[in-house]
Image (cartoon, rainbow, N blue to C red):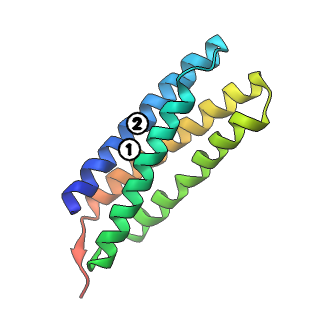
Amino acid sequence: MAGLHQTVGGLVVVAWIVVTILAAIEAGTGRRQWTRPASFVAAALLLLQFVLGFGLLGSGLQNSAGHYIIALLILVPVVVQQAAEKRMTTQARGTAVLIASLAAAFLAVIAYLSGTWGASVPTP
C-alpha cells in the first residue's frame, strides 16, 4: 500500500501543477473554463491520498511529523481556492485562485519529498 500511496502522491503533485498552469492562463484571459473541474480532480486525488495515508498509519507504518503537517496544510489553499470561486469578483478570483493553486502545488511537492525522505517504517 505504501507504493500506491507514493504513486497517488505523485499524481497529486502533477494535478496541482496542472491546476496552477490552468489558473495562470485563466487569470490572464479572464475566462473561467477548466480550472474549477481540474481543481476538483486534484482535490479528489488529495482525498484518496489522505485515505491511503490513514490506512498506512492504521497498519502500523509511520513517517516524519513534518510530512503529516505539510500534507494537512495543503487543505488551506484548497479551501481558499474553492471559496474564492464563489465569493470574489472575477478579477480578484483569478488572482486568488492562482495564488491558492500555486501554494497547493508547492505544499504538495514538499509533502511528496518529505514522504520520500522520511520513508515509512514500522512502528516499534
At horizontal 71% and vertical 37% (from top left) the residue drawn is 84
| Residue sticking out furthest to the bottom | 124
Viewer-proximal residue among 65 and 49: 49
Residue 2 in the figure: left or right of residue 93 = left
Q: What mark, if any, has residue 12 been given in the picture?
A: 1
Q: Please identify the quadrant where the N terminus is shown.
A: bottom left
Of helix, strand and loop, which one carries label 1? helix
Of helix, strand and loop, which one carries label 2? helix
* Residue 94: quarter of image: top right
Using the rendered image of the protein, determine whether residue 63 is visible from the camera's viewpoint. Answer: no
Q: Which amino acid does label 2 sit on?
A: Ala
At horizontal 56% and vertical 25% (from top left) the residue drawn is 23
Q: Which amino acid does label 1 sit on?
A: Val
Residue 63's place in the image compared with 95, above or below, is below
At horizontal 43% and vertical 29% (from top left) the residue drawn is 18
Viewer-proximal residue among 15 and 110: 15
Q: What mark, if any, has residue 15 been given in the picture?
A: 2
How many numbered circles does the render carry? 2
Check contact, mark 1 vs mark 2: CB within 8 A.
yes
* Residue 11: quarter of image: top left
Q: What mark, if any, has residue 33 been given in the picture?
A: none
Residue 112 in the figure: left or right of residue 47 = left
Using the rendered image of the protein, determine whether residue 39 is visible from the camera's viewpoint. Answer: yes
At horizontal 26% and vertical 53% (from top left) the residue drawn is 6
Residue 107 in the figure: left or right of residue 33 = left
Residue 52's place in the image compared with 26, above or below, is below
* Mark 1 surroundings within 10 Å by alpha-carbon count, few (fewer than 14), some (14 through 19), many (20 or more): many
Q: Tell me where residue 20 appears, x and y as whole percent.
A: 50, 30
* Mark 2 surroundings within 10 Å by alpha-carbon count, few (fewer than 14), some (14 through 19), many (20 or more): many
Tell me how far mark 1 sits from mark 2, CA to CA: 5 Å
